Image (cartoon, helix red, strand yellow):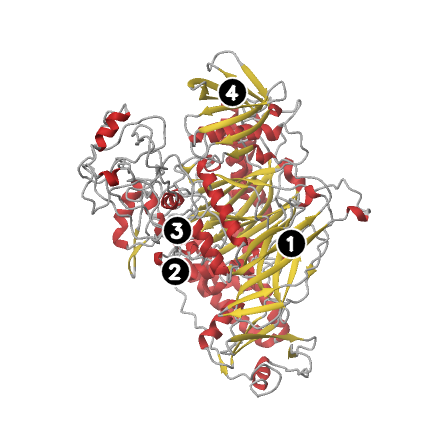
């Protein structure tokens, strides 16, 4: 269909944008319907509103417009005839069609930079099938056509043969191949199934091969039998069965020979290394000892913690080789509490003999050791819990662009998460993952070869058997899922699919493969994609992403109205996304130097994927763990020491700056347990110009639930009630709406009545719903319902098309009471608004069972308490006012979290009205680049007094949200600390004893309040002038961190705030060293302090 006003499968929101840009009443376009297959949608602009009419096709292939009541139904044979009729006035539409919106012209697609100039390797076509289909229509014409095609095929193959280096091919073989291509290839095309001439050619080339293989096989079989680990008594080797030298026999013999040669070396090495009766895989998890420091009455003592996962014991020892002092079985270990403030500190809650709890506090050597200890304790708790079904799984996800090169023999470091970035401690090497998901791009191997390599590698590092769940390949893009054999019966509804996004969306050199399954009651989805390459092709990559979202079909078919990101409890997206560092090519050497100095945080703000996600252009509501590993592309093959960022081409020098092309992201339902335990890349796998990337996750799952109540009792039947609901939609459509409710806890889809009221305001539509139907779950047990989620879809009453989908968690703090909820709405990967209201859960008595993943928790330290106080004040404020739009709510939420939105002058003094109290100024993370340490206080450049050696540092011009991590981990505290310092002030009483900061113990309090009349923007704290020491309400006395202060007037000496001098940090660039001032002798008596003021 080549009509200029037909736009194909563009989205509804894109159609609204095109019509709004036109701005003329009567502007129109036709697109494909999103709700009905093989139907169309006619979109018309009238009085700044978009009206959508669905065009349906009946059984007789006639088209008609779905109009309102009172308008006669008219049928048309073609879409052009229908459009021509509705150009007339007063024929049933809101206005007649006048101005067609021309289809957007797509520029010529350039060849992918990673592909050579030669045409791509297109999979071979089935010529016989093509011929048979054409012969049915016009036998005489197609017969002549085929003869011409066969001649062209013969000429093409002869040309290819001439281009190949055939110097090593014998002359008689070369002559036989040419004769076959000239004379016999056409006959084999006609009877490709028999291939008689091809068999003759193969027998000519393989003369003597069969006899040689037959003579070699018995020798190899005898050697293999010698090294068999288990040899049955009385076994005698059979002599080879003679046979004719046919093609089938040669293939069978060659496959036997290949198998023997490939496995013989491994078999001999295994027997010689481990012995004939010992398995080559390692045994179960051995006992592991950690050296820690324990606090006892304020005295730090060195001790040892021994974790025995197999016996389920935690043993406390004073010395590593000494006797066991105490031991606690797994059931006596109640909880592990991680300190968020100190990454190497851990509190273990134990149950004593008198059924009392005891807290033991330990400090590990580093945070990695603490994480390894927690993972081992979690593994022990899971193994000895006695639960028939698991509450949590560990999942390994890996992505690797293999660069069309075979992998090395050893790739176990990939699965052990060894390399750079957030890696696992060596003490966790024995912990096996439940599921392994491996995505590859530019994979040269066939499926069987790759699966054999993966299973062999896992057998070397684990003691479990892994079963192949599924494998799917699109050209050289592949996804493989392996799971423990013990989980095989829990996995069901396996589904795979693929989407091509190559040239014209028809070639599979770029695209995505996906796989999904159900694990008991939890749905999982995995996507491996290879997007368009090139630093300048961000728009094309964005189109790839949206095409994958729309056309990759996986998961429950009942959830077809929903975006792919809403169909799964946990969705993981991995692959070579090809996003680059957006910096000039002239900065290439500077980029390499920053990578060598591990200054990754200075390059990440220029990562295209981070920039796109920050603007909500792509991967909406996805999460990614903090990147602490170097760029994974483009390395010199065979080494990880050098980046090859230039490539000479016919068009000139091509630059490929080092970039984080290979990524892993995820998205889960709200309030589902997800913990990223590692995210990094390997260092020792160098066959490709990409490094393999790994990411491991701990995720929560739900089991099949058996109700304890009588299902036939009407008194025990519960329901879910939603009240005072309204949706805020970003649309200019003029239509009525209704809500569809989907959930695994509902027997069928539930539809509401049409919306009660609407209020449009400049592209924002607020839709209010009246009484919504009560939702009756299939099981009314509260323990079951608190683990469920409710999917909502806002649909148009006219076209049944979705205007936004969202997800509501039923895990409420007070299920019996009305609780407020709020969820964002999205459609086809774009944010379309929000949905909010109140929800109440009417269910039988009960409570949620303690989950195994709740065994490890994070301590809510001082910083978290401040955030919670802000959140509570925000909720109280929200109840006292109503938000006019979704943008207002998002803006306010961002400001309260410490992210600056909009110009600084738009922020009012209410941003400083929420006060918290801190006893210590937070320090910058160790990985923060110099010049970005916004939490440190420095003197103002205009100040008349500065500490000797200090130079004011101005941070780069970027918003605070640029430094904010996208993942919802607990490591995103640097930017929030800046806002906290600005907003947390303490007014000191004037007559309290003096108290100043001590450089040995850090700052004591923050600065004073700013004047209430000023509206200060949320920005990193500027350097402040030196003033007299403030009077602090403390009983102890510490020394000052600066030199002797400048004398001040009596009227100002008491109420001025003391500011701590900046700490010195090592600098890479040259410059004068900053001398740390020695602390003066502290004042000892009040009289001496008074004398200082006089």
Q: Earlier in the sequence, mark 3 or mark 4?
A: 4
Circle 4: element type: strand
**Of marks 2 and 4, the one in the foreground:** 4
Q: Choose between 535 and 44: the one closer to the eye.
A: 44
Residue 664 appears at what percent x and percent y? 47, 47
Q: Locate the N terminus and report the quarter of the image it occupies.
A: bottom right
Per the model, the C-alpha gap separating discs 3 and 4 is: 43 Å
Q: Residues within 10 Å of mark 4 (few under 14, many from 20)?
A: some
- Measured as percent of width and height from the top left, residue 823 is found at 56, 54
Judging by the rendered image, the residue that carries numbered circle 4 is 306
- Dot placed on the residue nearer the N-terminal end, 1 or 4: 4
Work out whether residue 733 or residue 1042 is closer to the camera in this orientation and state it: 1042
Question: Nearer the viewer's eye, disc 1 or disc 2?
Answer: 1
Identify the secondary structure beneath mark 2: loop
Marks 2 and 4, how far apart at CA: 54 Å
Q: Which residue is mark 3?
A: 961
Secondary structure beneath disc 3? helix
Of label 1 and label 2, which has the lower sequence position? 2
Earlier in the chain: of badge 2 and badge 3, it is 2
Q: Are marks 3 and 1 in contact (CB under 8 Å)?
A: no
User: Upstream in the sequence, badge 3 or badge 1?
Assistant: 1
- Whether tag 3 and tag 4 are in contact, CB under 8 A, the answer is no
Which marked residue is nearer to the observer: mark 1 or mark 4? Answer: 4
- Quadrant placement of the C terminus: top left
Q: Which residue is mark 2?
A: 537
Residue drawn at x 30%, y 29% as measured from the top left: 998
* Label ID, residue 556: 1
Q: Position of residue 314 (x, y in %)?
A: 55, 21
> Would residue 723 be seen by someone viewing this image from the given angle?
yes
Vertical position of residue 591 compared to residue 377: above or below = below
Q: Nearer the viewer, residue 775 or 704?
A: 775
> Nearer the viewer's eye, disc 3 or disc 4?
3
């Amino acid at each position: 269909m080549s009509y200029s006003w037909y736009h194909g499968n563009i989205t509804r929101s894109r159609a609204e944008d095109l019509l709004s840009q036109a701005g003329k009443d009567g502007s129109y376009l036709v697109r494909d319907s999103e709700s009905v297959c093989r139907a169309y949608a006619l979109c018309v602009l009238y009085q700044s509103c978009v009206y959508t009419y669905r065009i349906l096709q009946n059984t007789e292939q006639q088209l008609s417009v779905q109009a309102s009541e009172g308008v006669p139904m008219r049928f048309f044979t073609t879409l052009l005839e229908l459009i021509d009729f509705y150009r007339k006035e007063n024929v049933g539409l809101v206005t007649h069609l006048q101005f067609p919106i021309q289809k957007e012209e797509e520029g010529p697609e350039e060849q992918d930079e990673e592909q050579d100039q030669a045409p791509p390797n297109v999979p071979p076509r089935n010529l016989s099938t093509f011929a048979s289909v054409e012969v049915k229509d016009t036998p005489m014409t197609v017969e002549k056509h085929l003869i011409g095609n066969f001649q062209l095929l013969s000429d093409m193959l002869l040309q290819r043969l001439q281009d190949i280096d055939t110097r090593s091919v014998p002359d008689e073989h070369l002559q036989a191949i040419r004769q076959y291509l000239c004379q016999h290839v056409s006959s084999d095309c006609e009877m490709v199934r028999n291939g008689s001439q091809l068999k003759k050619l193969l027998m000519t080339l393989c003369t003597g091969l069969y006899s040689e293989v037959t003579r070699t096989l018995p020798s190899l079989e005898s050697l293999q039998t010698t090294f068999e680990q288990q040899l049955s008594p009385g076994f005698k080797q059979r002599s080879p069965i003679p046979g004719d030298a046919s093609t089938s026999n040669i293939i069978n013999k060659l496959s036997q020979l290949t198998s023997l040669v490939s496995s013989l070396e491994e078999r001999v090495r295994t027997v010689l290394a481990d012995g004939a009766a010992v398995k080559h895989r390692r045994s179960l998890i051995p006992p592991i000892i950690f050296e820690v420091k324990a606090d006892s009455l304020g005295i730090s003592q060195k001790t040892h913690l021994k974790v025995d996962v197999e016996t389920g014991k935690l043993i406390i020892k004073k010395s590593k080789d000494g006797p066991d002092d105490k031991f606690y079985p797994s059931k006596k270990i109640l909880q592990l509490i991680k300190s968020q403030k100190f990454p190497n500190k851990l509190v273990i809650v134990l149950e004593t003999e008198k059924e009392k709890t005891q807290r033991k506090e330990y400090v590990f050597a580093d945070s990695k050791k603490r994480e390894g200890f927690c993972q081992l304790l979690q593994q022990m708790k899971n193994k000895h819990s006695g639960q028939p079904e698991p509450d949590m799984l560990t999942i390994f996800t890996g992505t690797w662009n293999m660069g069309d090169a075979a992998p090395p023999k050893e790739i176990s470091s990939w699965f052990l998460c060894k390399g750079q970035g957030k890696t696992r401690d060596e003490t966790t090497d024995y912990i096996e993952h439940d599921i392994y998901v491996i995505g590859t791009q530019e994979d040269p191997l066939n499926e069987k070869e790759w699966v054999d390599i993966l299973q062999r590698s896992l057998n070397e590092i684990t003691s479990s058997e892994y079963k192949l769940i599924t494998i799917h390949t699109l050209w050289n893009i592949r996804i493989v899922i392996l799971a423990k054999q013990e989980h095989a019966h829990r996995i069901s509804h396996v589904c795979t699919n693929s989407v091509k996004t190559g040239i014209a969306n028809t070639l599979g050199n770029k695209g995505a493969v996906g796989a999904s399954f159900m694990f008991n009651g939890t749905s999982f989805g995995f996507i491996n994609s290879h997007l368009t390459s090139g630093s300048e092709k961000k728009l094309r990559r964005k189109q790839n992403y949206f095409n994958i979202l729309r056309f990759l079909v996986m998961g429950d078919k009942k959830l077809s109205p929903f975006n792919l990101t809403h169909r799964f409890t946990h969705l993981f997206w991995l692959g070579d996304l090809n996003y680059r560092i957006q910096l000039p090519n002239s900065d290439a050497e500077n980029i390499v130097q920053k990578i060598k100095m591990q200054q990754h945080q200075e390059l990440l703000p220029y990562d295209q994927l981070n920039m796109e996600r920050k603007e909500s252009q792509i991967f909406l509501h996805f999460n990614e763990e903090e990147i602490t590993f170097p760029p994974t592309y483009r390395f010199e093959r065979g080494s990880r020491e050098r980046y090859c960022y230039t490539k000479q081409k016919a068009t000139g020098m091509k630059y490929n700056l080092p970039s984080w092309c290979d990524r892993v992201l995820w998205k889960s339902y709200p309030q589902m347990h997800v913990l990223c335990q590692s995210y990094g890349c390997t260092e020792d796998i160098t066959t490709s110009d990409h490094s393999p990337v790994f990411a491991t996750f701990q995720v929560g799952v739900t089991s099949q639930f058996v109700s304890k109540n009588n299902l036939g009792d009407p008194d025990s039947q519960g329901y879910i009630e939603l009240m005072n609901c309204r949706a805020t939609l970003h649309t200019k459509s003029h239509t009525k709406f209704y809500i569809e409710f989907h959930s695994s806890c509902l027997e069928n889809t539930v539809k509401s009545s049409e919306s009660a009221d609407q209020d449009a305001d400049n592209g924002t539509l607020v839709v209010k719903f009246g009484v919504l139907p009560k939702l009756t779950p299939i099981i009314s047990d509260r323990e079951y319902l608190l683990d469920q989620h409710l999917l909502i879809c806002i649909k148009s009453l006219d076209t049944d098309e979705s205007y936004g989908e969202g997800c509501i968690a039923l895990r409420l703090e007070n299920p019996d009471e009305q609780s407020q909820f709020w969820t964002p709405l999205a459609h086809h990967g774009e944010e379309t608004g929000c949905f909010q209201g109140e929800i109440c859960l009417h269910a039988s008595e009960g409570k949620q069972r303690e989950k195994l993943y709740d065994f490890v928790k994070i301590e809510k330290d001082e910083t978290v308490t401040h955030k919670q106080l802000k959140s509570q004040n925000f909720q109280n404020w929200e109840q006292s006012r109503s938000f006019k739009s979704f943008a207002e709510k998002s803006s306010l939420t961002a400001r309260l979290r410490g992210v600056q939105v909009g110009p600084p002058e738009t922020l009012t003094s209410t941003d400083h009205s929420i006060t918290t109290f801190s006893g210590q100024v937070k320090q910058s993370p160790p990985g923060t680049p110099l010049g970005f340490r916004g939490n440190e206080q420095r003197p103002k450049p205009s100040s008349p007094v500065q500490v000797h050696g200090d130079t004011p540092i101005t941070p780069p011009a970027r918003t605070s949200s640029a430094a904010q991590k996208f993942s919802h981990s607990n490591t995103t505290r640097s930017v929030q600390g800046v806002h906290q310092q600005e907003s947390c002030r303490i007014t000191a009483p004037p007559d309290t004893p003096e108290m100043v900061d001590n450089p040995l113990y850090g700052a004591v309090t923050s600065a004073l309040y700013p004047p209430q009349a000023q509206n200060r923007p949320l920005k990193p704290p500027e350097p402040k002038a030196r003033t007299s020491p403030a009077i602090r309400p403390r009983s102890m006395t510490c020394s000052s961190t600066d030199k002797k202060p400048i004398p001040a007037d009596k009227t100002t000496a008491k109420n001025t705030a003391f500011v701590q001098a900046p700490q010195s940090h090592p600098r890479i660039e040259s410059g004068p060293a900053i001398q740390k001032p020695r602390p003066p002798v502290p004042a000892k008596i009040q009289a001496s302090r008074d004398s200082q003021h006089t």
